[in-house]
Image (cartoon, grey):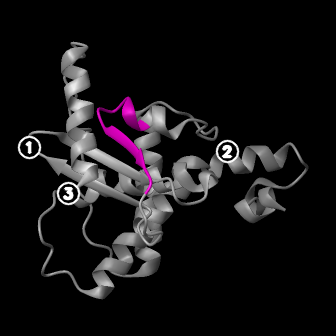
Amino acid sequence: FRFEQRCRDYRWLEEVLDAPSLTRPRGYEFPVPRSLPDAQDQGESLAVEERNRLALGSDPVLDAFQVVESQGVRVILMRLESTEATGICVVDSELGACLMVNTALDPNRRSYDLLHEYCHLLVDEFDGANRSGETQDDHDVVERRANAFAAAFLLPQDGIARFMETRGVDRKDARLPDVLA
């Protein structure tokens, strides 16, 4: 599989360059969400917690790739023939944490897709194991949590509210759709 080979190449380059060893970022313990609204709340809460841990403030993240790589994660950009997969998250005992983002998709979504996979790394312990006990409902809420994390990590609600206040919109009324309008 090309992704695994690219992860191995990345690790080999680090060894050749005598780069410091990467350590997986600390994970968070969140139960599988009970509902889609619970998943949304968990994703947003996790984004706030991780942004606080990284001391990012409430401004938008301009370079998600640098942020994720600074946490000891190997990020691979590669084109997949299928556009159904936006990214992959793998944790391997030899290679560490590796995330892949599919470059066949819209370039404007790559940061979002990367952060979606980063959420799986932080919470879901995707290690290549078969998650045979997972139901479709479990999958849906886990994916919703990762989507909520990616959106809230990129554009935190507090940052949106501050931006909208500069445009004369009351903080309590400021939402992302207003920024995009």
What kind of residue is marked 3? Glu
- 23 above or below 164? above
In magenta, the rendered stretch is: 68-79
User: Could you tell which of marks 1 and 2 lies nearer the N-terminus?
Assistant: 1
Q: Residue at x 37, y 76 (%)?
A: 141
Q: Is residue 166 left or right of residue 17?
A: right
* Local secondary structure at mark 1: loop
Checking the image for residue 28, the label placed there is none
Q: Which residue is identified by label 3?
A: 125
- The percent coordinates of residue 116 (x first, y second) are 43, 57
Q: Which residue is identified by label 1?
A: 93
Q: Residue at x 83, y 55 (%)?
A: 170
Q: Is residue 92 among the parts visible in the rendering?
A: yes
What kind of residue is marked 2? Gly
For label 2, count other residues whose C-alpha is less than 10 Å away and answer few (under 14), some (14-19) or many (20+): some
Instruction: Say if mark 3 contacts mark 2, CB within 8 Å.
Output: no
- The percent coordinates of residue 79 (x first, y second) are 44, 54
User: Could you tell which of marks 3 and 2 lies nearer the N-terminus?
Assistant: 3
For label 3, count other residues whose C-alpha is less than 10 Å away and answer few (under 14), some (14-19) or many (20+): some
Q: Work out how far the residue at label 3 is from the one at label 2, CA to CA, in angstroms.
A: 29 Å
* Local secondary structure at mark 3: loop
Q: Which residue is identified by label 2?
A: 159
For label 1, count other residues whose C-alpha is less than 10 Å away and answer few (under 14), some (14-19) or many (20+): few
Q: Residue at x 84, y 62 (%)?
A: 181
Q: Is residue 66 left or right of residue 96?
A: right
Give the quadrant of the N terminus: bottom left
Residue 54 highlighted magenta (yes or no)? no
